[in-house]
């Protein structure tokens, strides 16, 4: 039987110990090979260190090792007997906000680190705002370097209280926010429970990661399947076979289920759900499948098979929140390509309604959006799109803006109202 999969991201200010924490998780769960550990030992000796620098298990770029920082989003895969994990270690510098957005966009949980000596700082607030904007369902505050404050319970309590106040202001239910005192360097409360914090009754970080629910809103949402490919073998064995291949973005699909094909507005019924291993009784979010329908419909790549009783809105006018990723600023009137699901369509940028100040959680009206800035943008598309609010489905409520001449991704966008409060400045 396959184990559940949890995708989670780490974030925090520079030198808070994100990469060391990830390295500790990998090391203490025995998820690294002996030759990798030996390479880290040698590199640590070269740096004049008495103990292995576990951050080197994560910071793979030469520039990262030389500077002692994380630049790229480092993805790591590991598992325990209880669960499998995909971890995104994101950068701490403000100029890499776009990388944090990338790493957290598919996460079901975020681990936000703070240094116990400094507590909640501006970058903590900035990352919390971005994570809330992306509607990552659960948050863990890892109060790292607790050993450097002599395992002081009062220090931990003050930091946790301030952070819970911040997340409450961002709209997080407090039962979805957990604070854990850890030392990534020593290993306190990361995988093994620490005798140095007898005042802390909660789980270790790994225990929490192994026990939190992994089902997100997509699993309980209405059916959404962006069609990636139409399968027509036209062989003697399968002369009339027509299947629609794609990944279930949200909901569950079953034979006998009534569906709509959008934006065409065609109605049919699912006759079978298939994989290379045979037919399935049902398939949920994240499963790659082929769907066959009762009717011969004109369906192509870019169409979306949806729940007939709860379809998305079909519109060519979108109110969005975007994180701008390009060195060239975004201005009203820009003509770009918009990728939603498996469909790409020309688009025109309308008004820029606001720029989000992630430090103060306030907004102002900009003339343009610069790299790493987040703002509210109106977009009009050439083709009508079946879209959900991002709060209801992260897969079908998100999109990319693309530069037509180069194909470069310019922005990541969310459809609908952002979660973070946005008072006018």
Image: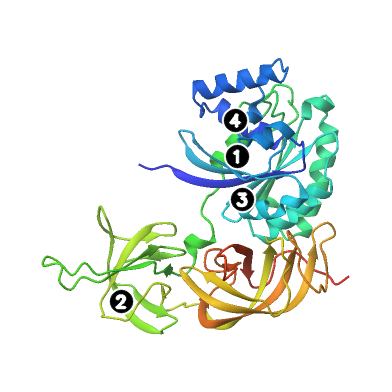
Tell me whether the residue at label 2 lies in contact with that at label 1, contact meaning CB atoms closer than 8 angstroms: no
CA distance separating discs 2 and 1: 41 Å
Tell me whether the residue at label 2 lies in contact with that at label 3, contact meaning CB atoms closer than 8 angstroms: no
Q: Which residue is mark 1?
A: 208
Q: Which residue is mark 3?
A: 103
CA distance separating discs 3 and 4: 18 Å
CA distance separating discs 1 and 4: 22 Å
Q: Work out which residue is located at the far left of the displayed protein and give it.
A: 236
Q: Which residue is mark 2?
A: 269
Where is residue 175 shown, x and y percent of the image?
67, 51
Where is residue 321 shown, x and y percent of the image?
68, 69
Residue 343 appears left or right of 112: left
> Which label's residue is closer to the chain start, 3 or 1?
3
In the rendered image of this protein, does residue 41 appear above or below residue 269? above
CA distance separating discs 3 and 1: 20 Å
In the rendered image of this protein, does residue 148 appear above or below residue 300? above
> Which label's residue is closer to the chain start, 2 or 1?
1
Quadrant where the image shows the C terminus: bottom right
In the rendered image of this protein, does residue 47 appear above or below residue 118? above
- Quadrant in which residue 211 is drawn: top right
The kind of secondary structure element at disc 4 is: helix
């Amino acid at each position: 039987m396959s184990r559940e999969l949890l995708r989670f991201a780490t974030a925090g200010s520079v030198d808070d110990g994100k990469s060391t924490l990830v390295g500790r998780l990998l090391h203490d769960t025995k998820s690294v090979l002996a030759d990798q550990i030996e390479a880290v030992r040698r590199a640590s000796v070269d740096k004049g260190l008495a103990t292995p620098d576990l951050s080197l298990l994560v910071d793979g770029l030469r520039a990262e090792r030389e500077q002692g920082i994380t630049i790229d989003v480092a993805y790591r895969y590991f598992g325990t007997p209880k669960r499998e994990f995909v971890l995104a270690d994101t950068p701490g510098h403000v100029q890499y906000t776009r990388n944090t957005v990338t790493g957290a966009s598919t996460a079901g949980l975020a681990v936000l680190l703070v240094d116990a000596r400094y507590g909640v700082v501006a970058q903590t607030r900035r990352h919390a705002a971005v994570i809330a904007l992306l509607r990552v369902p659960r948050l863990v505050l890892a109060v790292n370097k607790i050993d450097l404050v002599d395992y002081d319970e009062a220090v931990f309590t003050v930091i946790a209280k301030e952070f819970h106040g911040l997340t409450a202001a961002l709209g997080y239910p407090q039962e979805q926010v957990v604070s854990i005192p850890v030392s990534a360097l020593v290993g306190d409360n990361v995988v093994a429970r620490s005798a140095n914090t007898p005042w802390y009754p909660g789980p270790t970080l790994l225990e929490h990661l192994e026990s939190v629910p992994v089902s997100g809103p997509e699993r309980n949402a209405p059916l959404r399947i962006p069609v990636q490919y139409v399968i027509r073998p036209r062989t003697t064995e399968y002369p009339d076979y027509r299947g629609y291949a794609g990944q279930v973005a949200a909901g569950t699909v079953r034979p006998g289920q009534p569906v709509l094909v959008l934006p065409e507005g065609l109605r049919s019924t699912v006759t079978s759900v298939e994989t290379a291993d045979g037919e399935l009784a049902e398939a949920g979010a994240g499963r790659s499948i082929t769907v066959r329908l009762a009717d011969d419909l004109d369906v192509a790549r870019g169409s979306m098979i949806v729940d007939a009783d709860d379809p998305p809105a079909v519109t060519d006018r979108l109110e969005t929140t975007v994180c701008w990723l390009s060195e060239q600023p975004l201005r009203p009137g820009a003509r770009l390509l918009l990728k939603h699901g498996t469909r790409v369509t020309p688009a025109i940028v309308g008004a820029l309604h606001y720029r989000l100040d992630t430090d103060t959680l306030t907004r102002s009206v900009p003339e343009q959006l610069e790299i790493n800035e987040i703002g509210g943008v109106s977009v009009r598309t050439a083709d009508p799109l079946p879209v959900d609010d991002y709060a209801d489905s992260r897969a079908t409520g998100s999109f990319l803006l693309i530069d037509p001449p180069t194909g470069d991704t310019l922005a990541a966008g969310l459809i609908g109202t952002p979660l973070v409060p946005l008072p006018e400045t």
